Image (cartoon, rainbow, N blue to C red):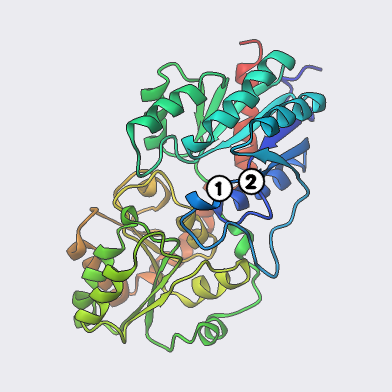
Amino acid sequence: MTKSDESLSLRICLVGPSYPYRGGISHYNTRLALELRKKHEVYLVNYKRLYPEILFPGKTQFDESKNPFLIESDRIIDSINPLSWLKAAFRIARFNPDIVIVQWWHPFFTPALVKICTILRVLGKGKIIFICHNVVPHERSILDGILTRIAFIAVDAFLVQSNEDRDNLLYIKKRAHFILHPLPLFDFFKRGDINRLQARENIKSGDKNLILFFGYIRPYKGLKYLLEAMPSIMEKIKIHLYVVGEFYQDSTFYKDFVKENDLAGNVTFVDRYVDNDEVENYFVASDLVVLPYVSATQSAIAQIALAFERPIVVTDVGGLPEVVSEERTGFIVPPEDSEALASAVIRYFSEDWGTKMLPYFEDEKKRFAWAGMVSALEELFNSIQGV
């Protein structure tokens, strides 16, 4: 039997954040490790320090949930301490992995990952695969492109999760060996122990039609266009918007806009990182999730909504149209277009699209199963053996 046999258990080192760090990539990495362990031996190398506090825009990097996603990991990598990079590389080499799978999302980590991967190329025979969450950052500079090119030199293959990231990858590394597989469902928030009425009581939302904007707020998320759409929506239907997420920018513009346009009774800001235990409340309570992004590669928010079988309005940017099926799981509208957002929301409620879309979710969710992600990684590994 050879390593190309898909039934063979592999030794896999997974490099990326997990508990005690919060956020989508930490959750993703944990969920992937658990799925890989159903079939393979997995060693998870975590960060001892992720971002220096001065560079982190939120209140804390750590998961303070009562029920965090726990998994054992080896916390070694300090993003700004080169000695820790050496330690991590030698520790991984001793594990002697067939594959080293690295979570890639920002060129800030280039120095650490280049050092680790370069040492592993010398000491081991394991293939190095980067899972790209963003090939390049949403808000980028020339330096980001340079650092990304450097980081990708020692990588054998890539898994990208949208067509836009595929194009970005091939622009940076023209002959990159890659596979494309969509971001899997973020199904780990779904506990299934509350109904819609209970969820609405928990968040004190009342009985109006409820739309949800979820996740941290930065300009590329396009929240201002959704707020601009609210007056038009309110002329046609009774509506309440929940904006749930920590501001990673000054919130003054958004909150002043709400006051100046007499929206205070129809918009609720939950200006903080929502713990794992609370996520279910907001999605179960909501009728419709809106992602008015100006730019995107893919979005964990869309994958949370799909897991809860909540229809989504997305803008036609990045990989979002690849996730939402028009008139099956949601609507796709042009970016930076408040009128189009308003029309989609009004149409959803006035034409009872919630009922019409519900039967499609079960089949649509099959496209985003975690087992499919594992199979894609196995296929990618098999394709680069001997290369």
**Numbered circle sitting on residue 121:** none
Q: Position of residue 290 (x, y in %)?
A: 36, 64
Instruction: Check the image and report above or below for 56 versus 93.
Output: below
- Amino acid type, callout 2: Arg
Q: Which residue is mark 2?
A: 49
Q: Which residue lies at the image location 30% right of the left edge and 74% below the top edge?
A: 255
Q: Residues within 10 Å of mark 2 (few under 14, many from 20)?
A: some
Q: Which residue is mark 1?
A: 52
Q: Mark yes or no: residue 299 visible.
A: yes
Q: Mark yes or no: residue 236 visible.
A: no
Kindly report the distance in space between the C-alpha atoms of the residues bearing marks 2 and 1.
7 Å
Q: Position of residue 87 (x, y in %)?
A: 74, 30
Pointers 2 and 1 in contact (C-beta within 8 Å): yes
- Residue 142 located left or right of residue 262: right
Q: Residues within 10 Å of mark 1 (few under 14, many from 20)?
A: few
Q: Nearer the viewer, residue 367 or 219?
A: 219
- Residue 106 located left or right of residue 383: left
Q: Which of the 4 image quarters holds residue 103? A: top right
Q: Which secondary structure, mark 1? A: loop
Quadrant where the image shows the C terminus: top right
Quadrant where the image shows the N terminus: top right
Q: Which residue lies at the image location 34% right of the left edge and 74% below the top edge?
A: 352
Q: Position of residue 175 (x, y in %)?
A: 44, 16
- Amino acid type, callout 1: Pro
Q: Which secondary structure, mark 2? A: strand
Q: Nearer the viewer, residue 354 or 305?
A: 305
Q: Which residue lies at the image location 63% right of the left edge and 35% below the top edge?
A: 81
Number of labelled discs?
A: 2
Q: Which of the 4 image quarters holds residue 336? A: bottom left
